Image: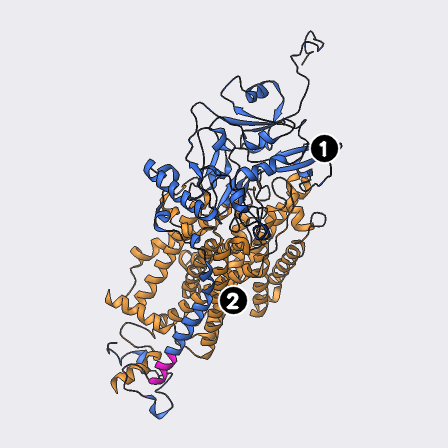
Amino acid sequence: MTLRIFEGKGASGESRRPCGSGAGACSSRPGMTRRSFLRASAGATGGLAAFAAAISPLKDLDSGDIPDLDTFLQKHYKEMSEAEMNAALDRIRARVEERYKVRPDIRDIKPMDGVEFVYALNLSRCIGCRRCVHACVDENNQSRDPEIQYIRVLEMPRGTTDIEQGNHHYERARVPDENHYYMPIQCHQCANPPCVKVCPVEATWQEPDGITVIDYDWCIGCRYCEAACPYWARRFNFVEPRLASPEEIAKTPDIESKRLNPEMSYLSNRPRSKGVMEKCHFCLHRTRQGKMPRCLEVCPVGARKFGNVLDPDSDVSNILRTKRVFVLKAELGTLPRFFYYFDERDPTAEDLPAMEHGGQP
Amino acid sequence: MTEYLRFLYRCFRLSFVGDWKYYAWMVFLTCISLFGLNAYCQQLVTGLGTTGMTDQVSWGLYIANFTYLVGVAAAAVMLVIPAYIYKNKDLHDVVIFGELLAVAVIIMCLLFVTVDLGRPDRFIHLFLRFNFPLSMLTWDVIVLNGYLLLNLHICGYLIYCTYRRREPNKKLFLIPFVLIAIVWAISIHTVTAFLYSGLGGRPFWNHAIIAPRFIASAFAAGPAFIILTLQVIDRFTSHHVPIGALRTLRQVVTVALTINVFLLISEMFTEFYTGAEHARSMHYLYFGLGEYDALVPWIWTAIVLNSTALVLLYLPHAKRGLWILNVSCVLMIVGIWIEKGMGLIVPAFIPTPIGEIVEYTPTLNEILVCLGIWAFGLLLYTIMVRITVPVLNGELTSDTLHPSEMESVRHETV
C-alpha cells in the first residue's frame, strides 16, 4: 500500500489496535504482524472449511443433474434445426437407454395440417371408474413415486355443476354411486391459455393443432404457469421422477424397464427430469398419427369423444352442433377445447310434439 | 481506474475490521448463511420436494418472502422523496442508508426467486427467449434488476465521490437517476402485485386492490424497518442520525399503515358481504374451511399486531419517546410480513381452482434456506454500512488512512 498519509483527520487519530501486546508480535513481514497474519489465515481457513462443509451435500448430485455441454447449449424447440433436433433426440435415446435399458422409439412428431383437436366428455355416461387416470399414467411415463396424474375425477352431487362441491378423493367398492355423477378434469387445451401467457421463457406454447405443449428441456421450473392455470391441469416434478417406488424395484429390479412406454415424442411423453413442469398433451404422439388418446381408448362406457373440430363429419363436430355443451369457467375467457355435455333429448327428433311457434317474447 | 480498484480493495479490507461486537455479529450471520446454503444444497440434490410445496400449493415461503422484501426495497423511496423533492435536511443525511438497504434487499429478492426455481441451471434461458411484454415475470426481472443497478449507481457514485473528496456532479450523474429511481421504486412493487392480480384463475388475487394494498403495506413496513436500522446505525457507528429523520419517517409509517388498514377493510367488506364463491380463499384465511384452518392463527396475529401498531402510532404522547415508535415498528414489520407472506401467497392456492383443499406447512429445510438468505442480506447490509460510515465521516478517503489501517502502515515504516 502506498504511503500518501499522515495528513488529515484519519491519520491523526489513535490507532485502534497498536502493534500487538506481545513483544515479539512485530514481525518483519511488511504490513502485517505475525499475530494478525495468523489470525487472518486461521479465519480464512476456518471460513473455507465451513463453506466446504455447507456445500458438501452437492457430492450426492446425480451425474444426470449436471447437464453436459451439448445439453446445456441445446436450443429452444422452435429454434432447433433438423440436425440439432436429431442430435437432441439422440441424446435423449442414449439417456433413456442408459437408465431404463430400453431403446426408445422417440421422434419429433409435428402437427397435421387442417387439424384442431377438441375433446368432448359425456357426463351422463362417465361412471367414475378412473381407468382413464391410470391408463394416462402408463401411457405418458409419469412418475409413480410420487405418482403424477394428469386427470382428476370429481364425484359430484346431483343437482349442481359447481366443482367446488366435488369430492376428489372418493373411494367406493362399486361405481357409479347412484346419488352422484362424475366429472373428469384434465388440461383443457385453452385457445386463450393463461399458462402460455405467463411463462417467462416461452417454455410452453400452443401448437397449430391447438395442443399446449412444454419443452421439458427449456422449462426453468418457476411454476408461474401452475399458479395461472384455472383448471389445475399442470404438474411439477418436485423430486426426480421414478417409474417405480424403491420397494417395487427391490422386488422386481427391471420393473422400470417394463413400465416404460418406449413410444415417445419430444413434446409429449418422453421421460422428464426433476424441477420441470408437465401436463396432458392430448397424447399427441398418438393423436398426431391418427390414433385416439389413451384415456379415450380405455373408457369402458364411451364417455369420451375426441377428434378434429375442423372436420364437419367428426364426432366432436357433431356433438358441438347437436348437444348442449358447456365448458368450465367460461367467464374467464380461456376458451377451452374441452367440452362437457349431458345426454338429452334431440330437439330435432321427429317424435317430439311440434309447436306452431315459441310464443310471444 | 487503479484508484477505484484500490478503493474496492480498501473496502474489502475494512469489512473485516471491527470491534468484538462487529465480529460476533458477522460470525453469527455467516453461520446462519452457511446453514442456509447447506439447506439449499440439499434442495438442489433432492429437488423442491424438500419444501412443503405441492402441486396444490405450488408457491410458499420463498415467494412470500420475496413479495415482502420487494416492498421493503421499494420503501427506500420514502426517504428519497422527502430528501430530494422536499429538500428535508434531516433525511438528506441518512437517505443513503435507505438506498443501501434497497440494494441489499433486492439482492435478497433475487436470491429468493432463484431458490424457488426448479432448474436454476437453466437461468440463461431468460436471456435467450424472454417472453416480454406478455409475462409479468419478465417485467419483474427487468424492474428488479433495474432498481438494483439504479441504487448501486446512486450509492456507489456518492460514496466514491466522497472518498475522492470530489463534489458529485449532481445535475448529470445524481439527480436524474434519483428521479428515475423514485418512479422505478413504485414500479417494482406494482409489477410484483400485477404478477398476482393478473391471474384470472385465482379469485383471491384477481383484484384491482392488490397493487394499492401492496404499496400501502410496503410503505409502512419498509420505513419501519429503516427507522429501526437508523437507530442501530446511530448507536453502533460514529454516524449521527438526526431525530428529525425518525419523526418524518414516523409520519410516513402512520399514514401508510392507516391506508393499509383502510384498504384491508374495503377488501374484506366486498368479499364477505357479497358472500360469493370467490370468497372461499378469504374464508379459509380468516376462519378456516371446516377442519382446515392452518392460517387462521397467523392472520389474526397479524391483525392484532397491525392494529396495535396503529393505535400506538396515534397515541398522543408517542412523540415523546422513541420506544413506543420502536415497538410499533417491530409489531408492524412482523404483522405485515405475516399478512403479505403467509396471508397473501398461500391462501390463493387453497382451495385449488377445482376445489381441492390441501394445506401448506413449510419444512425445516425450507425455513433454513429462508433464514440463510435473510442472514446473508443483513451481512451485505452490515458491510455496506461498515464502509459507508467512515467514508461519509471523512475517516476513509483516498488521501488518508483509516485508523484500522494504521497498524499495517506502522509496520511498513518500522
Task: Tell me which chain appears orange.
Answer: B
**Chain A colour in the picture:** blue
Subunit ID for the residue under disc 2: B
Subunit ID for the residue under disc 1: A
Q: Residue furthest bottom?
A: A23
Residue at position x 41%, y 55% in the image = B85
Residue at position x 65%, y 50% in the image = B285
- Residue B276 visible at all: no
Q: Residue furthest top?
A: A356
Which corner quadrant holds the C terminus of chain A? top right
Residue with the mark numbered 1: A176
In which quarter of the view is residue B168 placed? bottom left
Q: Nearer the viewer, residue B394 or A226?
A: A226
Q: Given contact means CB atoms under 8 Å apart, are the residues at marks 1 and 2 in contact?
A: no
Q: Nearer the viewer, residue B345 or A340?
A: A340
Q: Is residue A19 left or right of residue B197?
A: left
